[in-house]
Structure formats: C-alpha cells, structure tokens
Amino acid sequence: MQRYSFFRDRRKVCNYYEWKCDSGQCIESHQLCDGVVDCKDKSDETSKACAFIRCPSYAFRCQYGGCVDGNAMCNGIKECADSSDEHLHCPGYSDALITSGNCSNTEFQCQSGQCIPSDGVCDGRTDCDDESDEQQRICSLVFCPSFSFRCSYGACIGGYSKCDGVVDCRDGSDEDEILCGKPFPFTTPKTVSSTTTTTTTTTSAPIIRGPVGSCTVPAQPANGRIVLDETAQNVLIGTGEYIENFNSVFVVCDDKFTIKGTASNICLDGEWLDPFPICERYCSEVPINGITVQPICEYQRKQITCKRPLPPTTKVRIDCKVGYQKPLGPINETLTCIDGSWDSTVFRCEPTCGTPTPDAEAYIIGGRNATITEVPWHTGIYRNLEADTIEDLRSEDWQYICGGTILTERLVVSAAHCFWDVTSFHDLRSFIVTAGKYRRELNAVESLPAQILRVRELIAQPQYQDFSGYYNLDIAIIVLSDFIVFKSYVRPICLERDLRTESEKRIKPNSLGRVAGWGLTVSGGELSPNLKVVDIPTVDYYTCRDFSPVSYRPFLTGDKFCAGEPKTGTSVCQGDSGGGFALAKEISGETVYFLYGVVSSAPRSASGSCDNTKYVAFTEVQNYIPMILDAESRFPVI
C-alpha cells in the first residue's frame, strides 16, 4: 500500500493558541511564518499564509512574508523557508546578474544565450526559453513604478492588473485568493497572436432557418463576447442564435483588450451591416515608465496618461528624465502600441554624471557660492543607535556622521570606518542616507527637497579592521533600499572605469580636487550647519610622509594619497569622512568631475581634534574599481 509523507489530521478544531495547517494539523501560533516549516504539508510557510503578516521593526522579512531574525540577511545561514535571506545578491556572489554577451545593448541575454528585448525582463511573462528572465534573483532588484504591482518574486506588472481575474504574474501572485478576497481564477486568457477572429468547426447538423431577414450570430470573438445591448453586457448571445431583421448586437472585449472596429452591428435583410470587430490587447504601461525615461502618450491625437494600460495605436514619445541624457547611437524615440506590444524596445537614458549646476539657486557663505548644486553627487550619512526611535525619521536621535558620493541610483560610496563599531560593523538599520541636502540637520527646512533612503546592504573589504588596521581598505559601498531620483541638484559622479596602467590610475601631485562636507569649520570647533565646499591640491607620498607626525605615518597605507594646504590651514576635518575627492576634467568644453578619493583619516592635534596644518589621507578609489564594478553588476538599474 502506498504511504504518504503527511496525512490529514483528524482533529477538526485547533485551540485559541494554535494555527490550523491546510492538512488539519495544529501547530503553535508563534510557529506560523517564522521561517521554519512546522506543518507536515508546509502550509505554514507560504505566501498564502504569510502575505499579511507584519514583521517587527527588528526582524527581516522573507520574500514570501515570513519573519526571521534581523541579522539573518546574508549571514551564511538559511533561516527563511524559501532561502530568500541568503539570496544570490549576498556578499561573496560575484557573477553579474545582467550580461550582454552577443546581445545588443537594448537586449537581455538569457542564461541559455538567447537574446530578448530588455523590456521583457521581469514583466510577468516568460520570454526566455529557459525562463531566466523571470527569476527572483533578478526581479527582486528591478525598479517598479509607484503605480505598478510587484509580483511576489519581484516582477512588475500594471497596477490595474491586480485582482482583475487574469493571471499576469508568472507565479499568479497578482490573483492570490487572500490578496484579492475571491477564488483564484481557473483559466487565464491567452494572448491573441493574429488579427482575425477564430471560428469553431462543428459536426454537421440539420439546417435550421430563422425568421425571414434574420442574421446568424457568428462565433464569439477571441478575448470578447457578443451581447444584446451595451447596457446588458452580461447577457450573452450564443453562437448560432438568430437576430431578427433591423435589430443589433454589441461586442464587448475582456479586460485589457479594446475594440478594433465598430462595436455595434445591425442585421439588415439577412446580412450583418459591418464586419464584426476584433479585440486587441492593451499595451503594458510598465516598460515605458522606467526610472530613466519620461514618456508622453498620445491616443487619437489627444494626450493621455501613461500610467495605466494603453490602447492599440497609442503613440509614446520617450524623453529622458532630469539628470539623464540620451545614449549615443541610433535610438527610436517614438513607440506605437500594436496588439499588446510596443513596436520597439524602450531605450535607457544614461545618467549625466559629474556636472555641477551652479546656475541653480545658491547660498552665499563667506563671499563664495557653496551649494548642493556644486556637488550634486554628495550625500549625508546619519546614524541612530536608539532602538526605540530607529523607525522615526523625525527623531532627533538621528545624527550626521559622514559623507558619501553617489555612484548610481542604488549605490553610494563612503568610508568603511563610518559604519564600524568596536569589532565589527554596526547594524545597518541604524543608518540612513540623504541626497540633495544643504543643511546638516536631518529635518531642517530645505529650499530644494531632499531624499532620505534606508540602507539595504554594506559592501566592504572582508579584511578591514578599522583603527587597529591603520584604516587600510577604508572604503565601503552602500546599497540603498530604494532608488535615488536624479534631479538638477542630485546626480552621480563620474568614474574612470577603464584605466589600464598604474601610471594612469595614480593621481598626480598638485591635482586640485573638490571635497564637500559638514565637518568642523575650525580645529576643535563645531560641525558646520551648512554644506561647505573646498578645493585642495594633492601632494606626493614622500612629502606627505615627511610632513606627518611619526605616530601617524603607519596610517599612510598603500591605498592612500594625500591632499591639503597646511600653510593656509585649508583642509578637511571630523564630519567630512567618507566624502569624495572629485577631480575636474574638460570634456567637449564642459567641466566634468571624476571620483578619485574618499576622505579617510588625518593626524590629530593636541586637543584631540583634527590638525588642519597637516595633510589628509584619502582612500584611492582606482584601487577598488573591480569592487565597484562587481557591485554595479549585482545591483543593476533595470
């Protein structure tokens, strides 16, 4: 006799402190959605059971909704039932998620090597033969517009597709019974691949003639139905029924489909007055609303919203959002919706990096413009070590500690020591990153709106040992939990990614670099309330070493360079740590800034503050280009 791994429990009722599995088994209530499978049928650790579980602020939420320890993310131990806490984007995984291979820059390469349009990645429908375009490891990282719906594995579909009776997510999570409050749909309409209506073949039967002059109702249109009247759309007329002379019928299309042709048709002397229309699929609004592009939609010569499914023949003109520019080479700026698909792939705009915008609103400090628009790549890093207020961004417990530099919409580079505790890194929930701020106080009123983002992950060198390691390897890449929105005063810095020789990579002495921060304005003073910008020159290693106290020389490790003006006291100080050293270059008549260093450390004065009569050590970014490229491949902007 066949034996099963689980059986339906005979107990019908669980007590107040228990939860009932689908099989009837009872488990303790606290075992529900805790990351550990306790039901023999595994029903206690599913998205159906855990979709509406609210995890405490100190917990980590698994992809399916379970709650586990807050330190579970990437700790090498699988604590979620679906292993989503040990995802492939955890440190140590270095394979690029997005590879181009032999595909063009507007295509995505499947794991099998097949090329598909890039806007088909994580759209809810499988386009790769091996289904690699709809995998959680990629889709959990994609950008979803605010009006869209994110499937449980990360794909983005239109917001109107949620609970509409049609399965649009590959895993069916958009029609989940708990989410929608109604039974899961048993059938899913299939995409129409032709523009002609389908007909059904029936076995021969006796010919029955209707009244004189009547018309026979044809086969139901694909993805639609024939009804008697527009006001009675649920009253169907069956195929083969007769409609008397001079009467009409009406064609109604299913959700996400629209009429092509005349919806109403009249029977006239035994013939239908017009050909019956067909139902064409709407085009998804998600591909044209990427993080880098700005669409303008037009339908029947009228501008319409681009934030909902769009009918066939809609034309979309694609432009770049502020902070981006069109890519080089031929691109198609106008797209047309044709039977559910856009006739061309949406191009991705490229960030405008390293360009200040001094003509924007500025503040005058000491006779010199010092504004966030001069250093739009600069960010502030704030820390809160009080568990009771860590979720409250308005709390005064959030204190500014360091600066950072924007690399991409998801990545910021800073100094590793900004996140260090005594023997390891602080809990990342204790940090937030701000972009576009001029005033240091987190909740200060700004003339231009700032952005506040949580930290998802910190990528640092595993050998980093902070002070005991002389601040060697003092660099960290912050992975943000959301995307930075680029504006005229918020944009990334440029990065030299392709330098080959050591002489090209090494920064030259007397190179004038720009540094920004809210650090101490004088040695032993207080943090600056407003953002300050300073231009300081670099010096060669031997000059820096000879000018530094003997006790500080071990901190001039091989990954550092020095800069400052000791004679004039122009330097950086506490509070400036983590900020970028930006070097200007003239490109096509425009000044463009490239990131070459990160503020690391400086000798202390007798009072214990920074000594502005000494040089400052910067971590040389060119030493860590592979680390940055690896982070960019693991957290692409899709």
Image: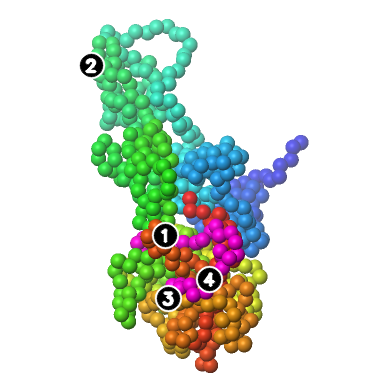
Q: Alpha-carbon neighbours of circle 1 within 10 Å: few (<14), some, or many (≥20)?
A: few
Q: Distance between the residues labelled 3 and 4?
A: 15 Å
Quarter holding residue 227: top left
Q: Which residue is drawn at 23% across and 16% down?
A: 246
Which element carries disc 4, helix, strand or loop?
Answer: loop
Q: How far apart are marks 4 and 2 (CA)?
A: 89 Å
Magenta range is 487-516
Q: Is residue 146 left or right of residue 129?
A: left
Which element carries disc 1, helix, strand or loop?
Answer: strand
User: Disc 2 designates what residue?
Assistant: 246
> What numbered label is drawn on residue 311?
none
Which element carries disc 3, helix, strand or loop?
Answer: strand
Kindly indicate whether the residue at mark 1 contacts the one at mark 4 (C-beta within 8 angstroms). Answer: no
Q: Alpha-carbon neighbours of circle 2 within 10 Å: few (<14), some, or many (≥20)?
A: some
Front residue of this view, candidates 76 and 594: 594
Position of residue 222 measured from the top left corner of the image (x, y, whole percent):
41, 26
Residue 142 seen from this side: yes
Camera-side mark, 3 or 4: 4
Position of residue 62 measured from the top left corner of the image (x, y, whole percent):
56, 57
Quarter holding residue 568: bottom left
The first of marks 1 and 3 along the sequence is 3
User: Disc 3 designates what residue?
Assistant: 535
